[in-house]
Image: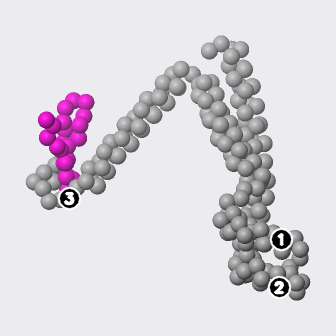
Amino acid sequence: MKEQEKKDLQVELKSRKILKAKLEVAIRSLNKQVGKIVSDRQSRKEKLSQYKNENDLQDAYGWGFIDEDEYYATLEAMRSGVEAIESEKAAQEIAQEMLKGWLKITESDISAIEFDLLSDKKKEEIRRDNERILAEREKRRKEKTLKDECTGDCDNCKYAYYATDHGYAYEESKLHCKLKEKE
């Protein structure tokens, strides 16, 4: 990598980190607002459950227990149902979701740029480590599948067979081999 490219990537990395910090601040601010909106929505649902029908709501309004705005909001919610209250999304909630998406993209970009700035030797080490980790996960997944399939009542429960690059290797265990004859 040329020196100028490296400097450009470092500038880009710095700007992405600044963007990430600003996005995190905005998301924290929106989290407070969304929390308030969700609690307000919950209180509207609870208020809606206080009234059995529109006559009860009209009585509450007539006796001055609720004001005109509350009456019309509750009446609308009563007519549209609780599902409408639960499904509505405020602009802050939509903005929060968008900013979280941008934050994930920015974090991914930061990781990619940091990887690009590494030496070729370090990149190769990381790739080898990742391949090793993936192979171990795949092996554990296969072992778990065999354990889940084990019934414990066949002649082969003493051995579990694992496919390897060099043929079949087996080890003693209480796993069911579940090998099916291939035709």
Q: Nearer the observer, disc 3 or disc 1?
A: 1
Marks 2 and 3, how far apart in space?
Answer: 66 Å
Q: Residue at x 77, y 64 (%)?
A: 36
Q: Nearer the viewer, residue 15 or 80?
A: 80
Residue 166 located left or right of residue 183: right
Residue under numbered circle 3: 151
Marks 2 and 1, how far apart in space?
Answer: 13 Å
The stretch drawn in magenta includes residue 9: no
Region of the chain picked out in magenta, as a range: 160-183
Residue 110 located left or right of residue 154: right
Q: Nearer the viewer, residue 145 or 59?
A: 59
Residue furthest out toward the top: 2
Res 59 label:
2
Sequence-first disc among 2 and 3: 2
The stretch drawn in magenta includes residue 176: yes
Sequence-first disc among 3 and 1: 1
Residue under numbered circle 1: 72
